[in-house]
Amino acid sequence: MDTTKIIVALLGAGGLFTAIFAFLKWYLPWRLSRKNKRGALQGLESLNTIYQVLHDVIKNTNATRIIIFAGHNSGKIPRAGSPYYTSAIHWRSEGEEAGKDVIDISSYRNIAVDGFYISILLKCYDRGFIKLSTESMEECQLKKYYLAEGVTEAYIYFLGFVEANFMYMCIANRGTPFTDVNTAVMGLAASRVANEINKG
């Protein structure tokens, strides 16, 4: 075989590889960029749905506040010997809806929880939700928070897991008890929120 023909063939193949490489260098970031944009838009749509659901519950029930929490161990899997925390992720409140919120929910970040609180989360996981009455709760950290905030009744719904974060939603009121219709609306709302959270 002629050496010149081999060199020409290799140069031709090299040119083809160069062209393919140049195309991939352009195409892959473009494709990832489109995928990221699509993912960002889907995420924003989910957030919008969640906030609309929270707004509707405040508007159509006796709820005075709703908070979606993430239980976490600083991004790791919970284990004995490490504190367990909870942080507010999304929320709506009656005061916020009226433009005069008295409680700064945004400060509910990295709150270390006690054993009673962890037992509530485990019951919530097992049953799907748990109802709490502040008056009949044993003395614990959560009861102190509820008394300070004027919460009389709360429903806590398990929403799912996002990575190692235990996601749950607390719907509470400050006086007027929840009705059967309220609890039905709240249960449906929890299902809708869980669907949005578990999409990703």
Image (tube, helix red, strand yellow):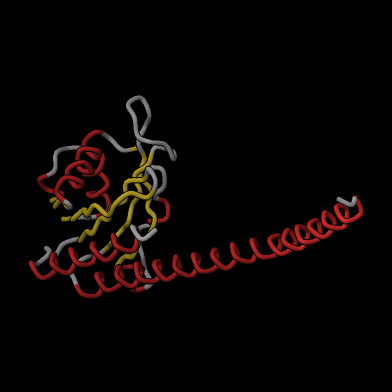
Q: Residue at x 38, y 56 (%)?
A: 105
Relative to 15, residue 165 above or below: above
Tell me which corner region of the image, top left, top right, bottom left or bottom right, holds residue 144. Answer: top left
* Residue 15 appears left or right of 196: right
Q: Position of residue 189 (x, y in %)?
A: 23, 66
Residue 168, above or below 174? above
- Between 147 and 2, which is closer to the camera in this rendering? 2
- On the image, the x and y values in percent for residue 188 come to 19, 67
Q: Nearer the viewer, residue 1 or 66?
A: 1
Q: Is residue 148 left or right of residue 107?
A: left
- For the point 19% across and 65% down, the residue is 186
Asked where in the image residue 14 lies, by quadrant, the reply is: bottom right
**Which residue is found at the position 78% from the left and 59% from the top?**
18
Considering every residue shown, the one lying at the far right of the view is 4
> Does 124 sit left or right of 108 as displayed?
left
Q: Vertical placement of 38 versus 71: above or below?
A: below
Residue 111, image x and y in percent?
A: 37, 42
Quarter of the picture containing the C terminus is bottom left
